Image (cartoon, grey):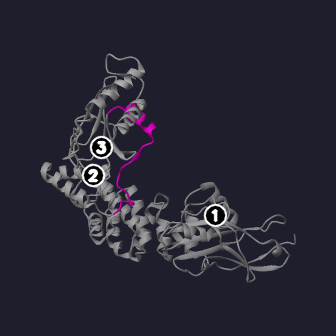
């Protein structure tokens, strides 16, 4: 990689860049406070890491400080910028402190491959390039997106004050406010008022992005905005999908049912339809069932999530239609365990399991959990006798404790409890609401005596149905 037009030796290149930084570091003064935001050693290390990661043949032409990045507006000039070229394509890479606040303008000055901001040590890196090779080379730094997530911790009052002042100063219309909110999300700034405004009044990708992070603030105002977006006509598929996704992340209740059903009736497209059906299943909003059945009758296998939603809503009139979708009428433990092994999926969201959810003799629902034990189609003359145990999470928030309860579930034979030690588990990391997962259970060796035995399983306080098994003498 060349650094500047007249330097060829690699060591001199790095030394030259470090000299450029050191020569100007004494002039760098952040606008936020008088404490240096980056030490000289940190500057050297970051500059070397970034320049070393750039594609072969690229050249760094200038290192600048105390300038607001192109396309952005900020009152904070604590920045370190690297400018250069890769062939005919220009790039700029900016480093700003973790608490830096800025908003991005609508129209980019420089073509860019992506709009992400990344965490780099205790700083943020803003790459500005239309060159995929440069963007890809930065991935060698093992970057993590700075975007807001559900782990965002509360609200930063100081950040909100700064973003409000920036938006009032530089934005005169809604599209500008939308782009500002979008850029704050990408930057990782928890500016809820701006994001909520974009989610409710915005459009396009910024609105979709703002809706998609509202789950970070699960309160009545957020629910109001999400319900309003879902109920609008005409439907905007991307926004509907993002709103339904945020609702599911927050935890859907029957109160969201009317808005979700209205969104489904507005025919928002295949992708949004799938998220809406999942959300309606989570909500247990019974009035949605007839409409979902009509959709299944019309679409058949093309409505892949209709059967699961109807099963979650316990809508028995759907049984004949779901029966048309199943591949086997004899759903045995062998069939279920093989299907689980073949799919290696988070849960068995298939028509056969949907049918079992509506017709099989499940154990009583305890704390939002049901268990079902399925016998084998044939009892082998030798070897282990396996059963398929299914766990359905009706309404319990997904967590690892529920999974551990199932992994360590006990087998009960004629009232005698055989505890199951926790071993290797190759299933999901957790069981989401309205998911069904399956695992195998074995008949204990001392029950292989040629007699009939009553068998069931227990996970925490929930019990499965009871089946009768006669095993040949081993």
Left or right: 149 in relation to 158? right
The image shows residue 442 at horizontal and vertical percentages of 74, 69
Residue located at (40% from left, 64% from top): 249
Instruction: Name the residue tied to disc 2.
Output: 184
- Please provide the residue range marked out in magenta: 130-153
Instruction: Name the residue tied to disc 3.
Output: 96
Secondary structure at badge 1 equals: loop
Query: Alpha carbon of mark 3 to alpha carbon of mark 2: how far?
Result: 14 Å
- Above-or-below relation of 146 to 225: above
Instruction: Name the residue tied to disc 1.
Output: 328
The image shows residue 295 at horizontal and vertical percentages of 42, 65
Q: Out of 197 and 25, give the one closest to the viewer.
A: 25
Nearer the N terminus, badge 2 or badge 1? 2
Q: Crowding at label 2, few (<14), some or many (≥20) Cα neighbours within 10 Å?
A: many
Secondary structure at badge 2 equals: helix
Secondary structure at badge 3 equals: strand
Query: Alpha carbon of mark 1 to alpha carbon of mark 3: how far?
Result: 60 Å
Quarter of the image for the N terminus: give it: top left
Asked if residue 146 lies in the magenta stretch, the reply is yes
Asked if residue 163 lies in the magenta stretch, the reply is no
């Amino acid at each position: 990689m060349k650094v500047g037009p007249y330097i060829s030796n690699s060591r001199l290149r790095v030394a030259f860049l470090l000299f450029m930084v050191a020569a100007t570091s004494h002039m760098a003064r952040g606008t936020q406070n008088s404490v240096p935001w980056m030490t000289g050693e940190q500057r050297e290390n970051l500059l070397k890491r970034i320049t070393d990661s750039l594609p072969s043949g690229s050249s760094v032409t200038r290192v600048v400080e105390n300038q607001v990045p192109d396309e952005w507006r900020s009152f904070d000039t604590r920045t370190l910028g690297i400018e250069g070229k890769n062939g005919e394509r220009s790039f700029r890479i900016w480093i700003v402190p973790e608490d830096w606040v800025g908003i991005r303008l609508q129209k980019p000055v420089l073509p860019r491959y992506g709009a992400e901001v990344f965490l780099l040590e205790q700083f943020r890196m803003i790459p500005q390039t239309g060159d995929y090779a440069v963007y890809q080379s930065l991935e060698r730094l093992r970057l993590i997106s700075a975007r807001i997530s559900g782990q965002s911790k509360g609200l930063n009052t100081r950040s909100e004050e700064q973003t409000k002042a920036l938006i009032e100063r530089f934005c005169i219309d809604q599209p500008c406010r939308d782009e500002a909110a979008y850029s704050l999300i990408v930057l990782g700034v928890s500016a809820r008022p701006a994001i909520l405004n974009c989610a409710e009044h915005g459009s396009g990708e910024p609105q979709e992005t703002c809706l998609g992070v509202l789950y970070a603030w699960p309160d009545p105002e957020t629910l109001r905005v999400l319900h309003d977006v879902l109920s609008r006509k005409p439907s905007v598929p991307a926004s509907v999908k993002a709103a339904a996704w945020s609702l599911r992340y927050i935890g859907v209740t029957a109160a969201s049912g009317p808005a979700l059903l209205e969104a489904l009736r507005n025919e928002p497209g295949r992708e949004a339809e799938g998220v809406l059906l999942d959300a309606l299943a989570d909500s247990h909003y019974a009035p949605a069932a007839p409409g979902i059945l009509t959709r299944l009758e019309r679409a058949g296998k093309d409505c892949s999530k209709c059967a699961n939603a109807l099963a979650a809503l316990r809508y028995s009139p759907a049984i004949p239609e779901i029966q048309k979708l199943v591949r086997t009428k004899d759903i045995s433990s062998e069939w279920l365990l093989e299907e689980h092994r073949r799919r290696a999926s988070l849960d068995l969201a298939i028509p056969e399991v949907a049918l079992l959810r509506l017709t099989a003799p499940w154990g009583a629902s305890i704390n939002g959990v049901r268990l079902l034990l399925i016998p084998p189609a044939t009892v082998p003359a030798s070897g282990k006798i396996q059963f398929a145990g299914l766990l359905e999470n009706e309404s319990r928030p997904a967590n690892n404790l529920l999974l551990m309860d199932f992994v360590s579930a006990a087998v009960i034979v004629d009232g005698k409890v055989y505890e199951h030690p926790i071993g290797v588990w190759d299933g999901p990391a957790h069981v989401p609401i309205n998911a069904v997962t399956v695992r195998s259970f074995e008949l204990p060796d001392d029950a292989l005596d040629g007699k009939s035995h009553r068998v069931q399983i227990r996970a925490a306080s929930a019990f499965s149905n009871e089946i009768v098994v006669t095993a040949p003498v081993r």
